[in-house]
Image (tube, coloured by chain):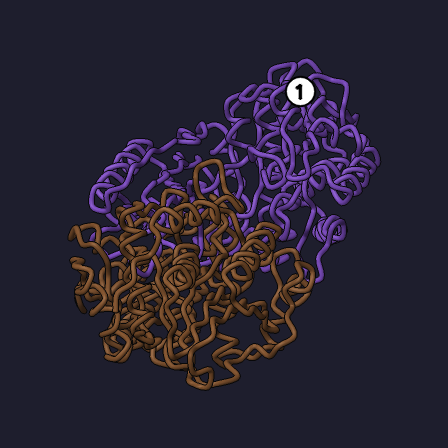
Chain colours: A purple, B brown
Amino acid sequence: MRIDIDRDRFLATLDEQSEFGATDAGGLNRLTLSEADRAVRDWFLEQMDAAGLSTRIDAFGNMFGRRVGDNPDTEPILVGSHLDSQPYGGRFDGGLGVIAALELIRSLNDHDIATRRPIEIVNWTNEEGSRFQPAMQGSGVWAGAHSLEEEYAKTDTEGNTLKDELDRIGYLGDIPAEPGEDYSAYLELHVEQGPYLDEEDRDVGIVDGIVGISWGAITFRGEADHSGPTPMHYRHDALVGAADVITAIRRIPGTLGEKTVGTTGYVDVQPNSINVIPGEVTFTWGFRDPDDDVVDEAFDRVLEEAEAAANREGLAWDWEERMRAPSVDFPDRTVSAVASATEDLGYDAKRMVSGAGHDATHAASVCDTAMVFAVSEDGKSHSEAEYTSPEDCFTAANTLANAALDLAEPITQ
Amino acid sequence: MRIDIDRDRFLATLDEQSEFGATDAGGLNRLTLSEADRAVRDWFLEQMDAAGLSTRIDAFGNMFGRRVGDNPDTEPILVGSHLDSQPYGGRFDGGLGVIAALELIRSLNDHDIATRRPIEIVNWTNEEGSRFQPAMQGSGVWAGAHSLEEEYAKTDTEGNTLKDELDRIGYLGDIPAEPGEDYSAYLELHVEQGPYLDEEDRDVGIVDGIVGISWGAITFRGEADHSGPTPMHYRHDALVGAADVITAIRRIPGTLGEKTVGTTGYVDVQPNSINVIPGEVTFTWGFRDPDDDVVDEAFDRVLEEAEAAANREGLAWDWEERMRAPSVDFPDRTVSAVASATEDLGYDAKRMVSGAGHDATHAASVCDTAMVFAVSEDGKSHSEAEYTSPEDCFTAANTLANAALDLAEPITQ
């Protein structure tokens, strides 16, 4: 059975959500639990009510809306994404998946289509991890990856706790932040945030897994000395050691695999003065690959490089791995539902692994999961310049709707 | 004619000055125009009065004390250094040279030695450049290298202007900040701040010049993208470009000369987040060498390296040279006076070029100049661990006194 979502209504609703926290440059500033987030949540709650969903807010602010199934006792399917944004993010990252889930419900209502399984849509709290860390926090608490109390106590840079902020905006719900029942499947539509679909001129992506990640930090300690009278051979320059390893982090992926990426995103230099040899430098690594063994190898290699650089420059050093997320393989059943939808709809789809973490990472530990990727123009993301054309938004939302309908088991009259 | 300074009084006075702004770790926190600087200035003014000097404060807070010459119309000689310190600096950097100048006057008084030329001692305002930039500011204004009004308007990180701070601590003097007459010579004793004298187990340094310097900054602009889904070959990583050039700045001196040094002291990464490919990085270079042609060559080489790194990584870039100070060669007349003093006193002296700028840099544009270097243990400086032994302090101060006496032309009775 196929469904056709209402293209105009869907695109109009997508535009409407992007007015909450809109920036002058066409992006969004909708940090989690901000006033803009409260406003878009209030609006989204009204839309779920208007679509006839029975809504609930859990103790971590995750918002659910359920459409009954013909057999209310069967395991429901869950479809959604997130409405929060980066400080200066795009209009599509997160919002597209939530509005597509809403449109699925509206279209089922339009066509009076019943499903055997209940369908729930969801807006997860704090996917972005900008204001409070970690990212994918709401889905992580829900899936049991994090402790509720520990995440409640997290603070933003102003010192506000997450729990107080949930309460302040009126989204500290009273039902437990946990599945509470078995779920049959989770589907999420998200923008690719990478260039592959655009580069290959594809219509849509079928995501069958998420890369493994190693994130960590290395600190080099040398000697802060006057940069003038200290001869080169007397120096223990922590920044020179760091620069060596940063260039290695650029090179390591090219020796491991075509999907491997490696990045240093953060550097702190002390005392950071033009006239002083840097005495201490902390910098990060981040490696990702669909194959966990490759992530392991990259991790080993960066530590070897750090040891070599420390020896060359005469530095003390230590390291800390801050996150190791194993790769996720989505099951055939849910991935096939997405693939079948693209075939039925005649879309040119690419099967791919997500290079970024998503709420689907955590959902996959609760139930069978898959994702749909919408084309990201030039792969730009976490930027106001992020763009997905209306056609590509529609294509991805239509794919999501048909895959979800399939998994929800439509009742044919 | 030889003079012997009073070792005990000199060392006791040196200790006394180091109590103003003393830190628990045995160093100094005596930022220019701070309360601690006011206190040490008030104390120093009393010492100059007590030594019979006629004192004056100029419009930039530079403090002078003059001992009359037998012929008051001859050009005076000037001897001094600075009493301000780094935020956590040592007790010797600056203060040693000022107290040695004071001891010269006291010893001349003790022995009732008259000189043909007047002798002036000086405490320059803001040599360190920590609170207000640039370094060597007071001597620079005095020598005409900087405009008084521009330097008055400089602000600290709290937004206080230098002029208001001079006024606040009572050191906005009413005589012009300029030589006002011709000077015969300037002598300055300073700690080496480098390891050569200590390494070679020398008694004292005869400084015959100051290295040339090029300071500048390079900015690379790439694209800030999500560090996960952006393939390596799509990246324009500003930090990778910067790291390439930082390692080049480590290597360039080794290809140019044994005295050449090159440093990156400052790095700013934007947006500086573990999960975002750095979109913009600004970092500094600093090269020094006694030979200006070598500084030129280093400057050319760093720009070549920057261009190559920008091309490899696909970055836009620009650069700015923030300071180019030509090397200074002190004249034979003043250097010989220092050298003769070391010979007369039987010291094992090393003739050397200063790797750091000093107030002597500016004084050298006004009159014949030379410097005396005291041993710096392990070359440590700009650190509370800075150390010069009492013996080495005495040796350097005795050298300064005898060189100054020679240049002031003692009247033999």
Measured as percent of width and height from the top left, residue B361 is found at 38, 73
Location of residue A139 with respect to B280 vertically, above or below? above
- Which picture quadrant has residue A316? top left
Subunit under mark 1: A
**Amino acid at dot 1:** Ala
- Which picture quadrant has residue A412? top right
Measured as percent of width and height from the top left, residue B266 is found at 43, 57
Location of residue A289 with respect to B140 vertically, above or below? above
Marks counted in the figure total: 1
Location of residue A96 with respect to A369 vertically, above or below? below
Lateral position of residue A269 relative to residue B205, left or right: right
Location of residue A21 with respect to A77 vertically, above or below? below
Q: What is the secondary structure assignment of the residue under circle 1?
A: loop
Quadrant, the N terminus of chain B: bottom left
Q: Mark 1 Cα within 10 Å, few/some/many (few <14, many 20+)?
A: many
Q: Label 1, on which residue?
A: A177
Measured as percent of width and height from the top left, residue B278 is found at 46, 54
